[in-house]
Image (cartoon, rainbow, N blue to C red):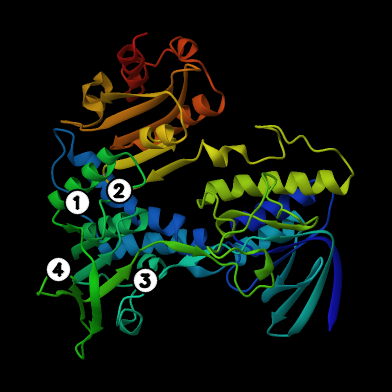
């Protein structure tokens, strides 16, 4: 067997694994990264990039059509899919491999598993390789779509997010099972491209966000012809001889018939059967500290979706940077600063996680909802404002409709959460993220004057609504 020694071994070459490896190399260590699929991972080929490439044309068209004086316009589905292909690099990872080489990171192709302390075996097409790490092994294996245990569902060969974002054709009828981010984004894409879409959700849409968000997205989807059924529980699924899919609901005698079915009911970490089962709990979680090191271990780290703390690409990359810096510091024998917001700890995972849902209207949130703040025992106050009442909103779109809610910790006088829904609000979110992470007092935010006439003037109106 080929045996190689390096400082750090990273299993998983998605954006999270790449960031860990890059960080430790920048810190003067050597790193090898293991990947069984495409270098660049889910986000590059089947999630963030291709999905947003598919969503943008419809949003851009509607943005233009919302301004008086703009007439006509239509999407070309074939051109939209071709644009998506370019953003997914035609599912060719040559460019990503070239980046690894330029960064000085060794790539080992194959499926990696932990076989002992600081030992990783890679099963590749050209034989097995054993990698021995002097300092750390990092698990960055991401997550996989969760398919619920519904009779007949797996046998019906449904699409998951991968097949949906990589689709080479637009089905005439599409059913989407789920009510979260992937479900509403997939429904948006295929409705824009001409499919007749039925969205089946067991609960209100986007229920992890403030309630007004799901309501706004649901109403907009219905206005564009999507049949949205909330409180819909599938009882059985079957695929007919003609290729169509029938979804029978628990409380409805008439089945939903579609040409394809997308299952978008959540994701689960890929942490089983890679040699770390002893560290995995019954709920598929791993107990890591804020440097992303597994508690009780001196050498094993888990980051990104595999850690299931804040399963978003940008949060995973943030965790990766913290973990990489911690590995380098420990390798040098340096003392780590474990205080909140220190360089080596992923503090933001606990209360400053930003997220954008690229539907139309967009939904954006960071920090806590009003309900979450109450659950944490904060003396919190929710402050709401109609985004359409801001002067700059009318310039962006005739009849602009949107809403914003700020959640304020009254004892400290700081923002702990913000949620927005409306066209283009994703680009407004980072200011709120900075205010939360920086714990900027509202009295100081009052001096941050928004430019007129921009949509950002909502900050002034919110503070006035609060009483400043």
Q: CA distance from mark 1 to mark 2?
A: 9 Å
Instruction: Determine which residue is flagged by label 2.
Output: 359
Residue at image point 89% right, 45% down: 332
Please state, as top left, top right, bottom left or bottom right, where the C terminus lies in the image.
Answer: top left
The 10 Å Cα crowd at callout 2, few under 14, some 14 to 19, many 20 or more, is many
Please tell me whether mark 1 or mark 3 is closer to you in this view.
3
Q: CA distance from mark 1 to mark 3?
A: 24 Å
- Looking at marks 1 and 4 on the same chain, the residue that comes earlier in the sequence is marked by 1
Q: Are marks 1 and 2 in contact (CB under 8 Å)?
A: yes
Judge from the rendering whether residue 229 lies leftward or rightward of residue 131; answer left or right.
left
Judge from the rendering whether residue 464 lies leftward or rightward of residue 228; answer left or right.
right
Judge from the rendering whether residue 121 lies leftward or rightward of residue 371; answer left or right.
right
* 376 over 233 or under it: above or below: above
Question: Observer-nearest residue: 384 or 73?
Answer: 384
Residue at image point 45% right, 64% down: 46
Please tell me whether mark 3 or mark 2 is closer to you in this view.
3
In the image as oriented, which residue stretches furthest toward the left? Answer: 254
Q: CA distance from mark 1 to mark 4?
A: 23 Å
Residue at image point 59% right, 63% down: 281
Please tell me whether mark 4 or mark 2 is closer to you in this view.
4
Instruction: Determine which residue is flagged by label 4.
Output: 251
Label annotation for residue 148: 3
Instruction: Determine which residue is flagged by label 1.
Output: 221
Question: Observer-nearest residue: 281 or 247?
Answer: 281
């Amino acid at each position: 067997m080929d045996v190689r020694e390096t400082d750090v071994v990273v299993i998983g070459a998605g954006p999270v694994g790449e960031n860990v490896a890059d960080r430790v190399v920048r810190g003067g260590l050597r790193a090898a990264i293991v990947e069984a699929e495409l270098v660049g991972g889910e986000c590059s080929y089947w999630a963030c990039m291709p999905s947003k490439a598919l969503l943008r044309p419809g949003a851009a068209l509607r943005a233009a059509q919302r301004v008086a004086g703009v007439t006509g316009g239509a999407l070309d589905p074939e051109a939209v899919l071709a644009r998506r292909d370019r953003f997914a690099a035609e599912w060719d990872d040559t460019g990503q491999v070239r980046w690894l080489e330029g960064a000085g990171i060794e790539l080992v192709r194959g499926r990696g598993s932990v076989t002992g302390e600081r030992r990783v075996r890679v099963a590749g097409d050209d034989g097995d390789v054993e990698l021995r790490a002097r300092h750390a092994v990092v698990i960055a294996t991401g997550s996989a779509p969760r398919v619920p245990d519904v009779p007949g569902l797996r046998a019906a060969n449904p699409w998951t997010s991968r097949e949906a974002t990589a689709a080479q054709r637009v089905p005439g009828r599409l059913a989407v099972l789920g009510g979260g981010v992937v479900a509403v984004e997939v429904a948006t894409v295929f409705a824009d491209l001409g499919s007749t879409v039925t969205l089946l959700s067991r609960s209100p849409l986007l229920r992890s966000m403030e309630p007004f968000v799901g309501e706004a997205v649901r109403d907009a989807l219905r206005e564009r012809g999507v049949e949205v059924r909330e409180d819909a529980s599938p009882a059985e699924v079957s695929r007919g001889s003609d290729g169509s899919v029938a979804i029978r609901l628990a409380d409805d005698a008439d089945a939903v018939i579609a040409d394809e079915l997308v299952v978008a009911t959540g994701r689960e970490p890929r942490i089983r059967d890679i040699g770390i089962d002893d560290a995995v709990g019954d709920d598929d979680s791993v107990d890591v500290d804020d440097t992303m090191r597994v508690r009780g271990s001196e050498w094993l780290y888990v980051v990104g979706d595999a850690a299931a703390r804040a399963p978003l690409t940008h949060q995973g990359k943030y965790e990766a940077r913290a973990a990489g810096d911690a590995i380098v510091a420990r390798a040098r024998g340096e003392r780590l600063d474990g205080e909140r917001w220190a360089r080596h700890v992923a503090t933001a995972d606990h209360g400053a996680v930003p997220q954008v849902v690229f539907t139309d209207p967009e939904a954006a949130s960071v920090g806590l909802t009003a309900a979450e703040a109450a659950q944490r025992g904060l003396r919190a106050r929710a402050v709401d404002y109609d985004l359409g009442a801001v002067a700059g909103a009318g310039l962006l779109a005739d009849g602009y409709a949107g809403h914003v809610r700020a959640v304020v910790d009254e004892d400290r006088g700081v923002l702990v959460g913000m949620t927005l829904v409306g066209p283009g609000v994703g680009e407004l979110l980072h200011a709120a993220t900075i205010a939360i992470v920086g714990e900027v007092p509202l009295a100081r935010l009052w001096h941050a004057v928004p430019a007129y006439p921009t949509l950002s003037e909502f900050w002034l109106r919110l503070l006035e609504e609060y009483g400043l």
